[in-house]
């Protein structure tokens, strides 16, 4: 602990004294190389040797809008608050497995990369605001619960990457789908045990469709762990969603990829007809969207049906 504190004090002094734009071998007793420009700094080759970010004099710090510190830190940087104007923050590969994680003083962030940082929880964005955040990369971590209520305030979020996390379940998925700028969600996983996937109700889908209609948007969901059917209402409730809204939903999700229903619950003929009915008004072209390619199911007679193709045969 004493050693860590000494190093922190040293870091502060060093950058107060330094006034040049490019610095190399910047932090003694570490392998770090620093690249400093007027508005950014990058830490290279630190190999997990830093307990915190270095500090500059406050005038310099306030000019910094971009910090790249990959594989550099051994915990969440407390000095982050010295950089209240940063827009781009890349801490990927650093070791941040801490309960304490604070983004409240970097409210200008547009881009946040926390990929491969050992985190187990989604940061509480509800508390931090971060109204400008457009890109959030949480891939390659240990996150088990994707809680949409924590992301609800991110109205400018365009890209959400949660690839390669051992996700167990998703809460408040409708909040995520309802984010007004969202264009893509990556939920691909090589080790996911995601089993429970709560369906959204017919009313929730109808509300989303209303939102999507006014923005004319596409949302691309990529997952290899759940089917569209598992988040969609049961087909016997389809009549609760007006056809116009159903059309908007499939249009918006047309670039998405879900898993096929190869195992239980297998689809039945009645359900299949309901799906065919709602799919029928959209795509007659040969370029089937990923959504239709993956929305297949297996009937009790063992025959696999691609919903779209079955419709075309009628
Ligand atoms: C600082 O780095 C930039 C880009 O790497 C380079 O173009 C510039 O010449 C360097 N300046 C000094 C003073 O070394
Ligand atoms: C960082 O380390 C790599 C591999 O050891 C080396 O090739 C590279 O030149 C180093 N970068 C700097 C800025 O020293
Ligand atoms: C910071 O800037 C202000 C005004 O621009 C100046 O008065 C002050 O001396 C500067 N501080 C440092 C540490 O450079
Ligand atoms: C901060 O940026 C302003 C405007 O680009 C510049 O005039 C000033 O010298 C910079 N301050 C420092 C300490 O780099
Ligand atoms: C985040 O960092 C990782 C590893 O450094 C990189 O592969 C990935 O492309 C970055 N994410 C974004 C959105 O740039
Ligand atoms: C979608 O929006 C258009 C105009 O923006 C409106 O005419 C139409 O009724 C809306 N559709 C639904 C299903 O709300
Ligand atoms: C569909 O997804 C692909 C790759 O995932 C992307 O290149 C393309 O722009 C997307 N199309 C739309 C309409 O979003």
Image: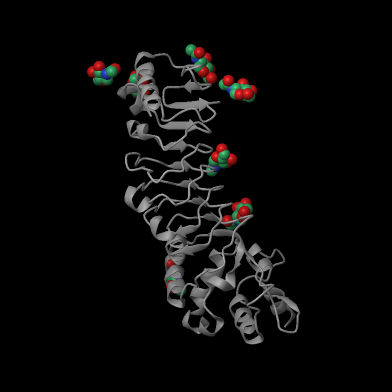
Instruction: Identify the residue at the far front of this view.
Output: 2
Q: Quadrant of the N terminus?
A: top left
The percent coordinates of residue 255 (x first, y second) are: 60, 60
Instruction: In the rendered view, tell whether residue 74 sits above or below residue 120.
Output: above
215 lies left or right of 63: right
The percent coordinates of residue 74 (x first, y second) are: 47, 34
Could you tell me which residue is drawn at 58 percent across and 73 percent down? Answer: 229
Could you tell me which residue is drawn at 48 percent across and 80 percent down? Answer: 242
Instruction: In the rendered view, tell whether residue 202 sits above or below residue 142.
Output: below
113 lies left or right of 18: right
Q: Nearer the viewer, residue 286 or 228?
A: 228
Tag count:
0
The percent coordinates of residue 92 (x first, y second) are: 52, 38
Could you tell me which residue is drawn at 43 percent across and 65 percent down? Answer: 172
The percent coordinates of residue 102 (x first, y second) are: 36, 42
On the question of residue 55 being in view, the answer is no
Q: In which quarter of the image is the C terminus?
A: bottom right
Q: Nearer the viewer, residue 94 or 217?
A: 94
Instruction: Identify the residue at the far bottom of this view.
Output: 270
Q: Nearer the viewer, residue 7 or 244?
A: 7
Q: Nearer the viewer, residue 1 or 188?
A: 1
Instruction: In the rendered view, tell whether residue 302 sits above or below residue 68.
Output: below
Q: Quadrant of ligand 3?
A: top left
On the question of residue 296 being in view, the answer is yes
Image-quadrant location for residue 147: bottom left
Give the image's coloring scheme: one colour
Could you tell me which residue is drawn at 43 percent across and 42 percent down? Answer: 110
């Amino acid at each position: 602990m004493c050693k860590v504190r000494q190093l922190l004090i040293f870091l502060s002094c060093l950058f107060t004294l330094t006034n040049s734009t490019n610095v190399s071998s910047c932090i003694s007793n570490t392998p770090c190389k620093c690249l400093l420009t007027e508005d950014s700094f990058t830490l290279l080759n630190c190999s997990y040797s830093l307990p915190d970010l270095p500090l500059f004099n406050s005038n310099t710090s306030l000019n910094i809008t971009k910090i790249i510190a990959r594989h550099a830190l051994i915990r969440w940087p407390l000095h982050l608050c010295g950089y209240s104007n940063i827009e781009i923050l890349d801490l990927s590969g650093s070791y941040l497995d801490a309960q304490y994680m604070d983004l409240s003083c970097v409210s200008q962030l547009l881009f946040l990369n926390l990929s491969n940082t050992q985190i187990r929880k989604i940061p509480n964005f509800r508390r931090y605001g971060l109204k400008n955040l457009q890109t959030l990369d949480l891939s390659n971590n240990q996150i088990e619960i994707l809680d949409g209520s924590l992301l609800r305030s991110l109205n400018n979020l365009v890209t959400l990457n949660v690839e390669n996390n051992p996700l167990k379940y998703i809460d408040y998925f409708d909040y995520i789908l309802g984010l007004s700028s969202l264009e893509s969600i990556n939920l691909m996983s090589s080790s996911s045990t995601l089993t429970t996937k709560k369906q959204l109700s017919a009313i929730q889908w109808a509300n989303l469709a209303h939102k999507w209609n006014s923005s004319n948007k596409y949302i691309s969901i990529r997952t290899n762990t759940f089917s569209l059917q598992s988040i969609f209402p049961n087909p016997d409730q389809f009549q609760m969603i007006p056809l116009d809204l159903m059309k908007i939903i499939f249009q918006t999700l047309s670039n998405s990829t879900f898993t096929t229903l190869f195992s239980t619950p297998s689809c039945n003929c009645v359900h299949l007809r309901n799906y065919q009915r709602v799919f029928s008004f959209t795509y007659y072209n040969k370029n089937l969207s990923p959504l239709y390619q993956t929305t297949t199911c297996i009937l009790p007679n063992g025959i696999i049906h691609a919903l779209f193709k079955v419709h075309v045969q009628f």
